Image: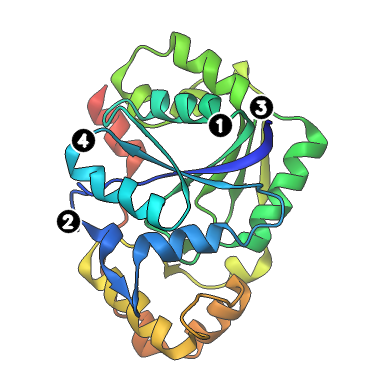
Amino acid sequence: MSLEFATIVQIRTQSTRLKNKVFLKIGEKPLIEHVVKRLMKSHLSQDVIVATSTNPHDDVIERWCKKNKVLCYRGSEEDVLNRFVMAAQYYKVENVIRACGDNPFIDFTFLDTLITSHEKCGADISNAFGSLVIGATAFEVIKTSVLVNIEKGADQKVYREHVTTYIYNNPEKFTINSLEAPEYLRRTPFRLTIDEADDLELCRQLYTEISRGGDFAYTSEEIISYLSKMPKIAKINSKVQQKDWKKELKEEH
């Protein structure tokens, strides 16, 4: 049986800036658990698939998935595009929601809005723009057939490592649906992604303040409202620099 919409989240243990961060604890649970459970709150994504690598270091991720009854696919460590395509084909996913494993506060409510928009307009890819909250809208919805076609022809390393970059570098070849982020994500800049130790500390303190029984149960709008009232916590990671992937692409070229 095929899945019309399913989330594929790329996760590995060998992160460059914060080693093994997927198993660092926020409250009593590891980051990977917060990310997966948050994504599962979507009403329109039919399942969540963890796409990790065949590197032996990532055996622990597969074991975690089996223990927690989460779908898992293992593929190339460097060729992330191929990993996504193979995972989507293995689980018969028609439309992939691409997500990353370092965003425990993903906006699942807006994700459903984006999925609905994608379905209605029939675009090749749908994304969000305008959010000042890093990590809240770090997702895209892409037709699997589009990823398959890209995977066959994209031969540059940068296109294999960054799943949808080929699309944005060749916009004339695709229909791109961009949806503006909701107003509450456009008010104040916050970092709700985990790249460095200060990011982790912010999430831990924020979690302590707002957790409900061990889960990130609040909507993103409620989380932003809380964070706006806690400037000391909000400042914890204010000096962390977001990686400029566009600059990285230029340097690679």
Mark 1 and mark 2 lie on one chain; the one further toward the N terminus is: 2
- Residue located at (42% from left, 81% from top): 207
Q: Closer to the camera: disc 1 or disc 2?
A: 1
Residue, disc 2? 19
Circle 1 residue: 91
Instruction: Compute the Cα span from label 2 to label 4.
Output: 15 Å
Q: Tell me the kind of residue under disc 2.
A: Lys
Label 3: which secondary element: loop
Distance, label 2 to label 3, CA atoms, is 34 Å
**Residue under label 4:** 55
Q: Identify the amino acid type marked 1.
A: Tyr
Other-residue count near label 3 (Cα within 10 Å), few / some / many at <14 / 14–19 / ≥20: many
Percent coordinates x, y for residue 178 in the rendering: 66, 42
| Nearer-N-terminus badge (1/3) | 1
Disc 1 to disc 4, C-alpha distance: 21 Å
* Residue in the image at 50% along x and 51% along y: 138
Q: Is residue 40 visible?
A: yes
Q: Position of residue 106 (x, y in %)?
A: 52, 61
Tag 3 and tag 4, C-beta contact below 8 Å: no
